[in-house]
Image: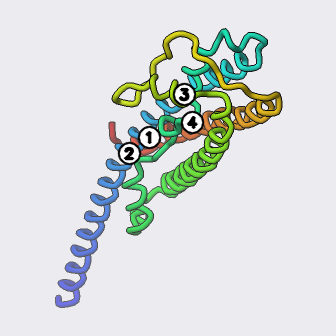
């Protein structure tokens, strides 16, 4: 009888611990779903912004290399003011839950190996995109080292309102005098900025699809809507 009582107590304790872990698992998953939904919203915003950015970068290249560049300086200044702005295109993941899962041993609570592996793969992809954003920032800094030879910072300053939001300049403000060598250097550095924009937009689309697939898998596995 004593053995039976001890055994029953052990079973009860085991069931309680199992229930506690299941509850923790579901709490983590609900929180992770919220984070993933925030990530998908941000990734969609970044993709849209990068689409607009690509058109502006192409326009700068086209106008500045035309024989009548001086006729398009209104557009050149307006598009150029956005080039070195990196905040609107940087992806900062909503990863509070992910950090808890990794650092507090939360991943061991995930009962499905497929789900655990999918979460890990998503985290690796996100870290890669964040790192690419750091590298892209270097190319923007390189662009800044040549842009001052073409554009008057006083014009840029006059284009900004109190919230730092730009508007097209009045009239057709002039560019600084620049050499053919300056233009070649500008073209190369602008090309690098354009290449990073395309590459990071491509990867943002891929990770967006990954996040959406993971969301579907989590909601199906845990019967959450």
Helix, strand or loop at disc 3? helix
Mark 2 vs 1: CB contact within 8 A: yes
Say which of marks 2 and 3 sits in front.
3
Q: Give the Cα distance between marks 2 and 1.
A: 6 Å
Q: What is the number of the mark on residue 213?
A: none
Q: What is the number of the mark on residue 35?
A: 2
Q: Give the Cα distance between marks 1 and 3.
A: 27 Å
Q: Is residue 20 left or right of residue 163?
A: left
Q: Is residue 51 visible?
A: no
**Residue bearing mark 1:** 39
Q: What is the number of the mark on residue 81?
A: 3
Q: What is the x, y in percent for residue 52?
A: 56, 22
Q: Is residue 14 left or right of residue 220?
A: left
Mark 3 vs 4: CB contact within 8 A: no
Q: What is the number of the mark on residue 84?
A: 4
Say which of marks 4 and 1 sits in front.
4
* Image quadrant assignment for residue 109: bottom left
């Amino acid at each position: 009888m004593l053995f039976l009582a001890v055994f029953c107590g052990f079973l009860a304790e085991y069931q309680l611990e199992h229930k506690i872990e299941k509850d923790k698992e579901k709490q983590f998953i609900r929180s992770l779903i919220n984070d993933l939904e925030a990530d998908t919203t941000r990734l969609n915003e970044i993709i849209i912004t990068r689409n607009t950015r690509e058109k502006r970068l192409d326009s700068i290249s086209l106008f500045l290399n035309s024989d009548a560049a001086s006729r398009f300086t209104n557009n050149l200044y307006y598009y150029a003011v956005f080039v070195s702005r990196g905040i609107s295109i940087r992806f900062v993941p909503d990863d509070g839950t992910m950090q808890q899962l990794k650092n507090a041993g939360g991943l061991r609570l995930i009962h499905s190996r497929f789900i655990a592996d999918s979460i890990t793969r998503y985290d690796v992809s996100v870290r890669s995109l964040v790192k690419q954003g750091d590298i892209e920032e270097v190319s923007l800094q390189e662009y800044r080292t040549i842009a001052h030879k073409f554009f008057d910072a006083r014009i840029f300053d006059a284009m900004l309102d109190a919230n730092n939001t730009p508007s097209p300049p009045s009239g057709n403000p002039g560019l600084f005098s620049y050499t053919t060598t300056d233009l070649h250097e500008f073209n190369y550095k602008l090309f690098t900025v354009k290449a990073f924009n395309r590459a990071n937009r491509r990867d943002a689309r891929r990770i967006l699809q990954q996040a959406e697939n993971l969301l579907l898998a989590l909601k199906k596995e845990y019967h959450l809507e």
